[in-house]
Every structure is written in structure tokens, then in C-alpha cells.
Image (cartoon, rainbow, N blue to C red):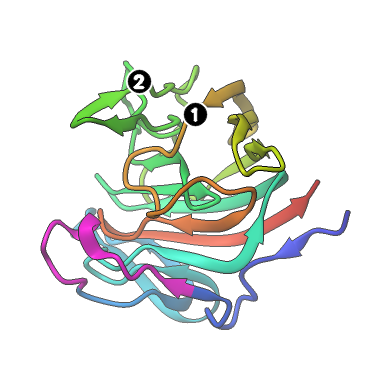
Amino acid sequence: MTSIQLFNGRDLDNWRPREDHHHLSGHEASHAWTVVGEVGLDLQSPKALITQAGEGIFYNGPEGRTPDLYTEYQHGDCRLQIEFLVAQGSNSGVYMMGKYEIQVFDSWGQEELTFGACGGIYSRWIDGKSVGGSPSRLNMSRPPGEWQSYEIMFQAPRFDARGLKVSNARFLQVIWNGETIHQNVEVGGPTRAAMLGQETATGPLMLQGDHGPVAYRNVLIEPN
């Protein structure tokens, strides 16, 4: 099937800010997501990004504290390609269907990976406890300020005619900077900080925006 460019490079007209702000821990967002032409690490302050005006990239502002951003487009089974760049110590995430997160994190030099490191499939939050989660099998991190890529083959959950779930969502394959890091990982339900609401057959792509400066570009999805 034909691939769909979810970010047109010029504006964020087909994206919406998340409105439930529980994930901001009681604090207001500082900025909105912004389209820019260039982005890089601020060498004088590596926890920040510097930008130049233009098109082709969107990022979550100088303080990296914006609402999560999700697409109007709803997907199910798909192949997603996306590029990201983080500042030092930054934390973001790619949520398939707004529910199931692949972690985006500055894990450069990290020796022991957990589900919370870059490339991890994040844990669920059940009865006040972290449950499950799958770390990346390799650390493919590049240094802060360098572009990285994910290619995600995703299978949506299945429901019967009554609307009851009959099979869970699966990350069929996740490729990080050219190396496979997950294969056929089942996700029993929404991961932590997912969009509110029940699991469904389709949902938006969501990007986390409130845990430090991060930039994205080339967001391409191919429905299956």
C-alpha cells in the first residue's frame, strides 16, 4: 500500500496536542511544538537544542515541556518510519495507536538496558505498580544531537463482533538505526502514560513531549 507522510514539513495542521494533562505532573506546558529547518545540540548547554528557522523538522520547544502530540490520522496494522534527535538526558516516546510506547531516550553509553532506556517497549501501570516491559536487545544509541531512526512493524489488537479483545497488540519487528531490537513482542494492554480510554482497533500516532527537548522528522506510515 502507499505510504503516508504524517508530517508535511511545513506545519502541524494534521496533529493535535493532547488535552489530558495528568502526564505533566500538575505543571503547565511551557511551549508548543514548533516547525524548524535545522536543529542541533547546544554545545554550551547540552541539555538544550538550538534551531534555525525553516521547514522539515518539528520539536517541542526550548524547555522540552509541551503537551504530547498526536495525529488526526488513525492507524491499525502498519509499518512506521520515524527519525528523532534528543538533547542530553531527554526522554520522549513513540506511542503506536496512542497506547503502546517505544521509548525515546538519551541512552548514549548506557551499558545495562531496561525497558525505560531507548528502544525499550515501556511497561504497563497496573494497581500502582510497573508491570512487564521489554528492553532493547542492543544499545544502538547515537550521541545526543545526532539523528536516529526507528522502523516499526506493528500489529493492532483484534476484537470480535461484540467488541471483546481476542488478541493483543504486537510489535512484530522494531529496527533501531539499522539493527533489529525486538521481534514479535506482545503487549497485554496500554503502556504507562498512554492516551486515556479503552483499547480499540485503530488509533493515532502519539509523540511524548514533556520530558526534555526532542525533535522529529520524516514520519512515514504504511498501512497493512
Q: Position of residue 125 (x, y in %)?
A: 29, 33
Residue 21 rendering spot, x and y as whole percentages: 24, 64
| x then y, percent, for residue 50 | 33, 69
Query: Residue 183 falls in which quadrant of the image?
Result: top right
Between circles 1 and 2, the one closer to the viewer is: 2
Under mark 1, the amino acid is Met
Residue sitting at x 47%, y 77%: 36
- Residue at the spot of label 1: 140
Magenta residue span: 16-29
Q: Residue at x 86, y 59 (%)?
A: 2
Which amino acid lies under the numbered mark 2 shown in the image of this protein? Leu
| C-alpha gap between disc 1 and disc 2 | 11 Å
- Residue at 33% x, 27% y: name it: 109
Vertical comparison of 221 with 115: above or below: below
Circle count: 2
State left or right for residue 88 relative to residue 151.
left
Q: Secondary structure at mark 1?
A: loop
Give SS at disc 2: loop
Q: Which mark is residue 113?
A: 2
**Picture quadrant where residue 51 is located:** bottom left
